[in-house]
Image (spheres, coloured by chain):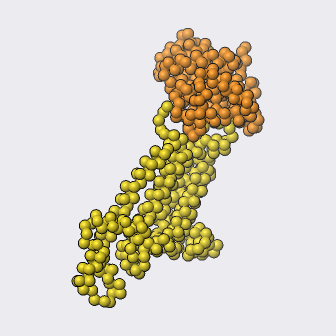
Chain colours: A yellow, B orange
Amino acid sequence: MIRYIIKRAASAVPVLLGISVIAFALGLLTPGDPARMALDRDGMSEITQEMLDAKREELGLNDPAPVQYGRWLWRVMHGDFGTSYSDHVSVGGELLRRLPVTLQLTFCSVLLVIVFGISGGILAAAHAGKTLDNILKVLTNLMLSFPSFWMAILLVIVFAENLKILPTSGAGSVRHLILPSAALASVNIAMTQRLMRSSMLTEFGKQYVLVANAKGIRRWQVLFAHAFPNAVIPVVTMIGNYIGGILGGSFIIENVFSLPGIGSYALAAIHARDYPVIQGYVLVTGTTFVAVSLLVDLVCAGINPRMRLGGKML
Amino acid sequence: MPEAILEMKNVTKSFGKRRSVRVLDHADFALEQNRITALMGVSGSGKSTLARLLLMLDTCDEGEILYRGRPVNMAKRRESLAFHRRVQYISQRPESFFDPMYRLRSSVMEAARIHRLEPAKASDRLSQLLEQVKINEAVLDRYPYQVSGGEIQRVALCRALLPEPDVLILDECTSMLDVSVQAQILNLLRDLQKEWNLTYLFIAHDIEVVRWFTDRAVLLSEGKIREMNLHNADGSLFGCG
Ligand SMILES: Nc1ncnc2c1ncn2[C@@H]1O[C@H](COP(=O)(O)OP(=O)(O)O)[C@@H](O)[C@H]1O
Ligand SMILES: [Mg+2]
């Protein structure tokens, strides 16, 4: 198990490096001259060639790209993401201020995916072919066919404007997070539910479930003590993958609900071609995703004895 | 007339949309007490379905299953529990016979827990059974994937015998094993049958094995069950040999 952890953690390093290279390259591809951008704060003063050359030297823009990358990576690892082109505020500080909002949103969405996706899948499997299964099938079909922003608008119309039980926008309390996280989670809940259902049905077909039934164990005990632990392993892995999508999809939802997270920050930055901000966003979400998949893989390995104890037959 | 311990009367079972595939068609069949009865039939003829019906894990479309001459009311927990204690099952596929998430010991002892066997007595009996099937106790601390097919079948036997059953339903329980291991298990099964006065339903499709193992066999084909004469029967009848 320890060897597995080390191997798995080591495999995350090249991915992180890849993300950082992409983020850095994004900065290199910037149209316009960073030195000029840095000097041209107010857009009024005259910029001379000497000033530009000096600034270039100061920012290290004359060095070869790998040297620049190394220096940049060093700064980034110390939390210095540079300053925004548009408001000249430190990108690192702003990301740090906004990150909790996005993480809360993601966390709530993932929670909804886990709770409703898994329990819905179990229910559907337990009633396979019956009415409840068919109802859930129609429901998941609907959820899969609505994109998240559409779902967001629908939820706002129903729960905020008609029923007036939840706020339409803003942040600050759990109530503010309910609609956005539901909108964000909806597609993933449906996908998780389907996967959980088919995974449960696969387990139902296995001999040990038949044997457990033949022992005289109650039906719900067979379901939860035997079929569920086996069926949930592939589902946990998939939810781990969905987290990337949820994190990435959050910028649409943050915008719809005016949540001050890193997604809406990045979206504004894309409009303004504010590359340091986009760089920072790519780095932060990429790193979060890598960390989460690492965690999910370790959890899966932890619950599966075959992974935990090594795959070899004795 | 030998006493029937488990029997099916006029049973019909179909699968598929609008029950179009009829696997059993008004079939009658009785397991005689303390005897080995072999059930033969080509693959897909419905042997495992019949086993599931006898184990009360599936319901008949028509007809009924009698245990010791009486129908079992599965809706009553006490009755169904008592039935599941006395009629045990061993399957074809050793690799998925035990839940992969649990150590063998907890799968084996689960039956003792469900049937409220006294823990001390149950573990005594388990040790005795393990000795009989020649399995080291330490094997029980492993997970199913860490044990060979032959060992799994031996542990499965201990598992089945732990709650003191009357009937064992053996569904092609040796077909996935090597020939030498197969012979060991069959010998073991025969010894156990004598020692514990068990009744076997031995599902198989190898006529030589059946001939060696027992003197009574029935054939399931086209939904009906009829007695076979093992002396004249021709092995080639069963395609898969
Ligand atoms: N749960 C089920 N649903 C639909 N068809 C089934 C089911 N169980 C068995 N069958 C069908 O019943 C027939 C008999 O299967 P089975 O009892 O497994 O045969 P055998 O054990 O003799 O090989 C097969 O045609 C199989 O497809
Ligand atoms: Mg079969």
Which residue extends farthest left? A49
Q: In this view, does B162 lie to the left or right of A136?
A: right
Q: Is residue A121 above or below residue B108?
A: below
Residue name at image x 53 percent, y 30 percent: B147
Please provide percent x and percent y for residue A112: 58, 60
Q: Which of A125 and B106 is in front in this view?
A: B106
Residue name at image x 69 percent, y 40 percent: A218
Residue A17 seen in render? yes
Q: Which of B142 and B90 is in front in this view?
A: B142
Q: In which quarter of the image is residue B213?
A: top right
Q: In which quarter of the image is residue B173?
A: top right
Q: Nearer the viewer, residue A243 or A290?
A: A290
Please provide percent x and percent y for residue A240: 49, 55
Please provide percent x and percent y for residue B51: 62, 28
Q: Is residue B25 left or right of residue A274?
A: right
Residue name at image x 55 percent, y 58 percent: A113
Residue B168 seen in render? no
Please provide percent x and percent y for residue B80: 73, 34
